[in-house]
Image (spheres, coloured by chain):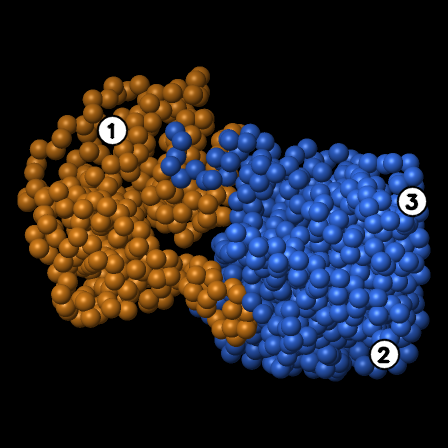
Chain colours: A blue, B orange
Amino acid sequence: MAPKASSGKEKLIDEEDEVLQAVILADSFDKRFRPLTTRKPRCLLPICNAPLLDWTFESLALAGVQEIFVICRSHAEQVKAAIRESKWSRPGSGIKIVPIMTAKETFSAGDAMRDVYTRGLVTSDFVLVMGDLVSNIRIDEVVRVHKERRRTNKDAIMTMVVKESGATHRTRAQGDSSVFVLDAETSECLHYEPVSAYPPTTMTRIPREVLEAHPEIDIRNDLIDCSIDVCSVEVPSLFQDNFDYEDIRRDFLHGVLTSDLLMKNIYCYVAKDGYAARVKDTKSYDSISKDILSRWTFPLVPDDNHPGGHVYQHTRGNKYLAADNSVALARTCKIGNNTLIGASTRILENVQISGSVIGRNCVIGAGSIIDGSYIFDGTVIGAQCVVKRSIIGAGVTIKEKTRIEKGCLLGDGVVVGPLAVLDNFERLSRRRDKTAGEEEEEDEDEDSDMEEIEANQEGASSMLGKDSNAIVWPRGPSEDDDDDDGIVNYKNQRLRQLGDDGSDLELSDAGSDSSDGESDESSEYDSSGEFRLTTETGTPLATPSLDVMHPPGTMQESEFRIEVAQSLERAFAEGHSVDNAAVELKTLRMASNVPLSRVREAVVAAIVEDIQIVDGALPQRKEISRVVGRWGALIDQIGGVDAVESVSALQMHCASSERFPLFGQILAELYQADIVEEDDIRAWYALPEAKGAGLVGGPTAENVKRCWAVGARMIQQFDEQESDSESE
Amino acid sequence: MASEVSNTPTQRAVENLAWKLRRRQIVGSRATALETLLVLRHVISKSRFSNMEQLVTIIRGVGRRLVEAQPKEHSVGNTVRKVLHHIREEYHTATRGSAAASYSGFSISKFVLLGQPRKNTPLPKAESKGTLKENDPDDPDSFARSLKPVLMEAIQDVLDELETVYDNVSKNAQNHIHSDEIILTLGMSKTVEAFLISAAHHRNYTVMVLETAPSYGGRDMAQALSAAGISTFLVPDSSLYGLMSRVNKVILGAHAILANGGMFAITGSLLAATAAHAHSTPVVVCAGQFKLTPLWNLYHEYGALDFGDPSQVLGFEEGSLVDKVDVVNPFYDYVQPNLIDAFITNDGDHPPSSIYRLIKETYDDEDNEL
């Protein structure tokens, strides 16, 4: 009975005998689509005439997911109703969809994950996606790879799906790229850094430990983050443990990768085939619509497997018309390429439509021009209108001779015109009906927003035409932004707008027309002239963009130094084990957020200070060997072995300490105890800093030079030994 | 859809297949035909009906659902039509004896095979007549009960035909390929592969396989053929015209054979057939009978209505091009009947001009629209 063509999905299930679960975060936790999303959640906005959530369900169904939890917050009732009425709740869909209402206090993806944890929804490895995903990637393949990896490595808690896209790509949002550092062989994610477009970023920092532990790494800035994560059950609990995690990438991923204590690994799956992208903003809405129409999402295309269940006829030039012959096209209308027209829509004479999506039951009046726009169901556009690169909500009425320039968003039910002219990037929504009590409007904070906007409507009505019921949303940086850097946000936000190419902004990820290379990586080489990525542990470089992330905080550092000294004093006095002392230091380092080199300096200093100055060469040597033998191992245990740096730290400390005469002996002892190798001493000796370069005058500089001379003698000895052994 | 089908396990089986077809998890004409047949068998064995019309309505309902789910896999509809045809035949045999059987005696295919029509048709199966009672008010299931074994047998016949299709198509391979010939083929077609391998048992000949971009099915084909010990060359698509003068015969596979004698076949077939036409090289198509489709090409002159994703042609990572270039990646070409010389099916060899007749024999006219 078993047919040959049984899909891989079934085999997978047979083997594992385990239900594949998925969690959809159906709330975007941002407001980029307003005013379209004031009365409707973003996941129910139509893209190519089917709600985004349906596209997401279909993407997961392709992967053989059997149980889906939809975490909804805003307009949760609408989401619930949509799921109940969709084809997915019919028998035979093979998928169980459970909407989960989360509390109003859920403000971020992290909160939602904590909710997932407290409800105990997931029982095994699960797929975590956003409610605005369009994908045809074989997620089951990713899950398989993930499970296989879990079998050998229990610490591989997450696999992220990323997609190669090239230096510039319409689907890779300009203000939303990130630098991934991957192990070339295992594609383990070693370092992650989000790159915001503004202020311009030209540098990325890669921790030195990454370069030490992995012989070959890929530094990539051309990946689209699909936000498809295959997670283990530990992931929600990690969110629970770290209550400050909000964003899955910025906080969670960064936190796990930088943590010395968690010791968890996160891997990337670089998808070669398939398509996946998220509708994050109006710009990606535009590019994903184009990708769907030009069939990158095959078999998830309008004429094949339209998630809304509509049937479309595909004709040459990627024109899609509803297949039930209900579309009325006037003989003189021109339908350009990459256009989708929904059922029962009427296109009248001399209309020109290109690169657009028209919903169902729309009317486009005679002589109108629609270019690159997205018009939702039931919209009526009068005669002689021009609509360019805009999103027009459902049930909108645009009266005759109205001009809508690029980047406009018109909320549901808006009426504009006649003879209205809308500038670029205008946002309109319907004025609320004052007489009817708006009980269904549950969100107070949204209400207050609306009131504020309604209060500022002077002079708008002349622009909107005499029959309009619309209010104009304010443009530019919003004043009530919580962050003080509202302007920065606004500039970044602009890049996410439909139709805004941000050509007047100076950006970090400059497009192909800019002169400074194609990607961040190349500009790093350009600007510094050498491979400066490894200087994480060195002296802090003056890069404004990154200093924001790592505040130097000299206050903190001196405090830290004192704390380390005290902690080690205690350890020396009470005779702790080296391991315990190392853990204590690690915790200290995490708490005060200082680079590893500071810890090393402090440890070396403390050890040196612990050595008692005794008279006579032999007892002194004994004392040194006691201390180094007891505590020398600590230098290597604090995280990352870097002997050259240890010697430098020793030199610097000795130069300014009363134990300066002991430098040679301590160095020799370190060498004896195998903490420092001969090669390390040679490397240190070759450093310009070791010679005292960069220090001006004073006894310290003098001492540094003398330390260097000691090193020179030592190397001489090494050379002699070598030649001795050779001559023997 | 008839209410009888809505009982859950049956409906679930139908929906399941519909989903798989929609999502393109089952592709290829033979695979879809097999799956359709299995679902139909399930439906017939589980559903309740008390007369012929009800049964036909049920099967048509299922068929319509599946065809709507994926109108581009023509063999789904073909299989449903074929099953309907067989059911009617069995029904007629059961009620009126040999009346129906004599109709198929003058088959075109047999005409070609046997040389001349014969009067003495094979004896119809000895069915016990009279037990078949439709709409029996006392026992509404009696009709179904008495007919079901026969129907199962009919479906088993179709199933057997599908399973033996490769053997039957390649039965006469040695009559079509002669020693020291150079054969040109393209794409990965199981039927053509079986045909060529079968011919290789008797003849010593050479095959040139076009790579068949962008799917590059030709590479698999070349591997399979050379593994079977046939002297095989894998050649780039661009050299097609240059090589054609040396080729003795072009053998193609088909996705669907249309009523006018044309066919849908993998992209590149039209190019190969046209080049062959220019050199007067015979073009032979190997295909199972389940690919016969009572349709015409309604799209346009050259393409079939099925386009894949552009990623095979233009990489997604070519970001700057993606925005500016419209990529068209059709799965199938439409090859006109005048470019084809013969169809080799599991039911004998036919010229394109007699395909209409074959379709009329295989399916009932009233099923052309499901």
Q: Does A237 appear above or below A432? A: above
The residue at the far top in this view is B138
Q: Measure the C-alpha gap from mark 1 to mark 2.
A: 81 Å
> Left of B360 or right of it: where is A88?
right
Q: Position of residue A710 (x, y in %)?
A: 75, 62
Amino acid of disc 1: Thr
Q: Which residue is mark 3?
A: A569
Q: Which residue is mark 1?
A: B93
Please give the chain letter of the residue carrying mark 1.
Answer: B
Q: Does B202 appear above or below B241? A: above
Amino acid of disc 3: Glu
Q: Which residue is mark 2?
A: A460
Please give the chain letter of the residue carrying mark 2.
Answer: A
Quadrant in the picture for the N terminus of chain A: top left
How many residues crowd mark 3 within 10 Å: few (<14), some (14–19), many (20+)? some
**What residue is drawn where x is 72% and y is 45%?**
A673
Please give the chain letter of the residue carrying mark 3.
Answer: A
Q: Position of residue A9 (x, y in %)?
A: 50, 39
Q: Does A393 appear above or below B360? A: below
Q: Is label 2 or label 3 in front?
A: 3
Q: Looking at the rendering, which quadrant does residue A681 occupy?
A: bottom right
**Nearer to me, B169 or A583:** A583
**What residue is drawn where x is 44% and y is 21%?**
B140
Q: Which mark is residue B348?
A: none
